Amino acid sequence: MLTIGKLGQAAGVKVPTIRYYEQIGLLPEPERSAGNQRLYGAKARERLAFIRHARDLGFPLDAIRDLLSLSDSPSQSCAAADVIATQQLVAVKERITRLTALQAELERMITQCAKGTIADCRVIEVLSDHGLCAQDHQARTGQGV
Amino acid sequence: MLTIGKLGQAAGVKVPTIRYYEQIGLLPEPERSAGNQRLYGAKARERLAFIRHARDLGFPLDAIRDLLSLSDSPSQSCAAADVIATQQLVAVKERITRLTALQAELERMITQCAKGTIADCRVIEVLSDHGLCAQDHQARTGQGV
DNA sequence: CTTGAAGCTATAGTGACTAGAGACATTAGG
DNA sequence: CCTAATGTCTCTAGTCACTATAGCTTCAAG
Ligand SMILES: [Zn+2]
Ligand SMILES: [Zn+2]
Ligand SMILES: [Zn+2]
Ligand SMILES: [Zn+2]
């Protein structure tokens, strides 16, 4: 059995994060020692590693919650899991598209700047007027990762 | 003079967002009508357009605050503004790098899945074990955009 | 003059944590 | 066995950039 600190080290997750996962019901309430400290077994370690890896791949906690409950019924079809992964892939691709447009605009404004005074700074000019942008780098949609 | 709603429409910003910007000191407190409603002039409209465009380009509000105060001293060197833009560019590039790695891993797990049961689902397998990943898609660093 | 839209303040909620305070538990060294 | 250092406990609040709600007042059109 591991204390919360050892579990955190083993899974690469900070201690408050583990408690947070417990609080939101992503990890079950563990056993306690005589002195009321949390004690975790192998199952909790695997579950936390799963969560951590899914987080590293950018899945939101809600999706992870669904994936975890799916993985508890191994004989079911995996279609639902694949849908969640596909949605995540779509979200990632959208963010890449958007960020690539931002990258182009930022590079453009920086290279066009003559490095003089603020009055002539291309960075400030472009920020003041989207008409000076080459692309339509559409509005901020969400965040994450 | 514009009411807050008209200003929001003109700049493409929702009304509560404008009040939020005022609250955090990004927009100055505007005049008020006899009935205590906010009234904005051309200067506020430009300032809000600047904020909105910078947000669309992914700049955090703190950076925008700095950019705004720089643009108030037009005769100064623009080096500081260029530094902020360059930092933003670096941040965007980092996110793209990371998201591209995520995209590759997600595509890999989805295409490798045999679409059978959860017990054999490659998505679930890979999420359980980073060793099955081809790349090191390093840890989640931040967020934004 | 009435009605409905738009505005006001204040508070709380989002996602996914992170940081801090103040108290209790455990472990290693002497 | 005692002490000191570290670890853990609960609870609260802060982060970022908003968004939503509630309950009120003001304004513009008909
Ligand atoms: Zn410049
Ligand atoms: Zn633009
Ligand atoms: Zn599958
Ligand atoms: Zn991996």
Image (tube, coloured by chain):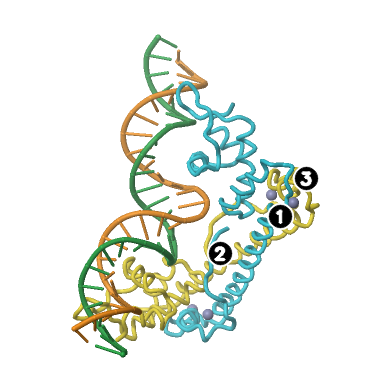
Chain colours: A cyan, B yellow, C orange, D green
Are the numbered discs 1 and 3 placed on the same chain, yes or no?
no
- The vertical placement of A63 against B14, above or below, is above
Figure quadrant of the N terminus of chain B: bottom left
Q: Where does residue A139 sit, x and y in percent of width and height? A: 52, 74
Mark linked to residue B120: 3
Q: Chain of mark 3?
A: B
Q: Select label 3 or label 2 by which is in front.
A: 3
Q: What amino acid does circle 2 point to?
A: Ala
The residue sitting at 53% across, 70% down in the picture is B86
Residue indicated by mark 1 = A82
Q: CA distance from mark 3 to mark 2?
A: 38 Å
Chain identity of mark 2: B
Alpha-carbon span between mark 1 and mark 3: 12 Å
Mark 3 surroundings within 10 Å by alpha-carbon count, few (fewer than 14), some (14 through 19), many (20 or more):
some
Residue shown at 33% from the left, 73% from the top: B27
What chain does mark 1 sit on? A
Please tell me whether residue A4 is drawn above or below residue A118 in the rendered image: above
Mark 1 vs mark 2, foreground winner is: 1
Q: CA distance from mark 1 to mark 2?
A: 31 Å
User: What is the x, y in percent for residue A75?
Assistant: 74, 42
**The residue tagged with tag 1: helix, strand or loop?**
helix
First along the sequence among labels 3 and 2: 2
- Residue to which mark 2 is pinned: B91
Q: Residue at x 71, y 47 (%)?
A: B124
Q: What residue is shown at x 61% (from left), y 49% (from top)?
A: A66
Residue A112 vs B126, above or below: the answer is below
Label 2, residues with CA under 10 Å away: few <14, some 14-19, many ≥20: some
| Label 3 CB sits under 8 Å from any ligand 3 atom | yes
Q: Report if the beta carbon of the residue with label 1 is closer than 8 angstroms to ligand 3.
A: yes
